[in-house]
Image (spheres, rainbow, N blue to C red):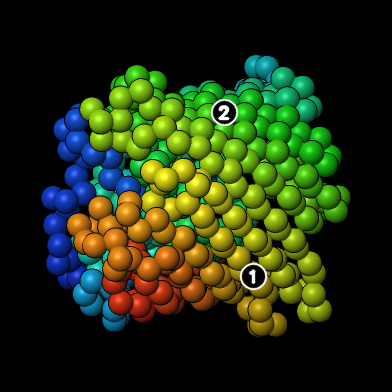
Amino acid sequence: MLPRVSVVTAFCAASFLGYSEATFADAAQGTPESAVPNIPGLSAKYLPAYTHIGNGLSWAGHLDSEIFSNFSGGIKPGSEGNIVGQIGGEYDTEKAGLWKGGKFTLSLMGIYSSGVQQNYSGDIQTASNIWAPNAVRFYDAAFRQCWTDWLNTRVGYMDVNYYFDVTANALQLINSSFGMSPTITVNVPGTATYPYSGLGLLVSTHSAHLSNKFAIFQGDPQHQTSAFTRGYMVLWEGALHWGHKPDEDLEDNTDEYGQYELKVGAWRYQQANPERYHLSPSTAGVYGIIEGNWTLTGDRQLGAFLQAGAAPENINPVPWYLGLGLRLGHPFASRPDDSISVGMAKAWLRPDAVAAGLDVDPSTIHSAETSYELTYLAKLTEHINIQPDLQYIQHPSGYYPDALVGMLRLHVEFF
């Protein structure tokens, strides 16, 4: 297995190394007093299903390689490449014969990008959800305990977007806003999500129709040893699930179940010393998600979603967000494992805040940035998928000319 993985990894890297034009000097982590980069990204649950090894131990691995090209508009035409890979394992204490309901998870993530993507398209929402500064780091180190059939707790180093603000029918779309709402990630660069997981504690409850989650996460996970000295974020999410399928396991799938879902959430980011650490001032917001799933003729599966976010305080560059889209599985009779998705992500902009970041006059900033996306995921083999993606970005950052962006992504699952 390892030689095959090495060959695939080498191919992915070689496929775009020639596209490198910019350096990462502008996106480095910097000193403890430097600003946290604003990098909304990868959606929830990046690793594929774990493969059982034995004695309660399972593992999984996943790698994405892509070429990003800004064909026109934005700041300038050009291309750059990205690779992100994650390998991880989990240890189930019940399967190991120890105690019921315990599960440890641990994963390592590596990121490589040949350029700064926003230097081409100029968008505030980030067209590719895997773009990030180069890094290799532990991404997940947590423990989950199921206390009863309705109560779970998790503690450790985690990605907040694994559990909050997740839109299952939007996960195939590549634009970052279809992952976590930009009213959170753009306004709060210290959010504990890709590419910086953070220390957190989560308590969740669920029943056949209702789920409820509450969590607290550190406010600046870029600096992993800071714990809560650089602020914190608290989140709550409640959801209504109905029309669930007979084969769904609520114990293992407490976040996403049911033919229909309605979610509402609220968050508060508290920062004691934002000027010292160049972080966002204290702020808060809410979000909502509606999803539906239907089976059509020919075993086609149709999913629809509507997302909304709000963080209306004057300090926030993105006070409002709206996302919507469709996902069609088994689009052609001869391609049962393929799927096609379309989506629109609109981020309203506060001209003064955005103009200050661009060092331009506020009167030149449009009221919103809107991305329209079309993407197709084709399964080539059991472990390899390819995904072409096209996005039209209207008013990138509210300032630059409309951009046309294309990407070609290769997904590889190792085990």
The dot on residue 326 is: 1
Q: Which quadrant holds residue 290? A: bottom right
Q: Is residue 3 left or right of residue 389?
A: left
- Name which residue lies at 49% across and 74% down: 372
Task: Pick whichever of labels 2 and 1 is earlier in the sequence.
Answer: 2
Where does residue 264 sit, x and y in percent of width and height?
Answer: 67, 44
Q: Which quadrant holds residue 95? A: top right
Where does residue 230 sit, x and y in percent of width and height?
Answer: 34, 24
Amino acid beneath label 1: Leu
Can you say whether 141 is above or below 87 in the image?
above
- Name which residue lies at 64% across and 25% down: 203
The local secondary structure at tag 2 comes to strand
Can you say whether 22 is above or below 162 in the image?
below
Where does residue 16 sit, x and y in percent of width and height?
Answer: 25, 69
- Name which residue lies at 47% across and 60% down: 347
The local secondary structure at tag 1 comes to strand
Marks 2/1: CA–CA distance = 30 Å
